[in-house]
Image (cartoon, rainbow, N blue to C red):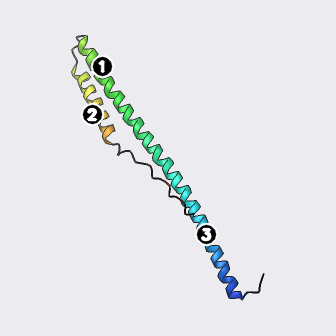
Amino acid sequence: MSWKDPSERHHEAMVEAIHQASHRIVHALEQGFRIMADETQAIADLTAAITAIGDAVTAEIAALTAALANAGVNNSPAIETAVTNLTALTASLKASLPPAPTPTPAPTPAP
């Protein structure tokens, strides 16, 4: 190793520190994108599950209403109100969901 001026050694040390810090930053960004993709997928899965529950409740309300009508049951105002409330609740549940997010791809690291 050749002799170097202290200011030159300091300059090289600073360049090396910046180089190491840039690698740490890239690693942190890659990890952040992976975590965000996992969270985005979890939100999309939850949205799909809530939508499926709403669809199932809607189908059950329709089946119950049809069964009562086929059986000749005269729906009381209380039953009609309950069905209306459940239908409104299902519609509100579906309307409260934001559109499913699309996962953000992780950036490609520079060579």
Residue under label 3, please give it: 21
Quarter occupied by residue 88? top left
- Which numbered disc flags the more N-terminal residue, 2 or 3? 3
At x 38%, y 32%, the residue is: 52
At x 71%, y 87%, the residue is: 6
| 87 up-or-down from 43: above or below | above
Image check: 4 left or right of 46? right
In the image, farthest residue toward the right? 1
Residue under label 2, please give it: 88
Q: CA distance from mark 1 to mark 2?
A: 16 Å
| 37 up-or-down from 90: above or below | below
Amino acid residing under circle 2:
Ala
Residue under label 1, please give it: 64
- Across and down, in percent, residue 76 comes to 22, 19
Amino acid residing under circle 1:
Leu
**Quadrant of the image containing the N terminus:** bottom right
Quarter occupied by residue 87? top left
- Across and down, in percent, residue 69 comes to 23, 15
- Which numbered disc flags the more N-terminal residue, 1 or 3? 3
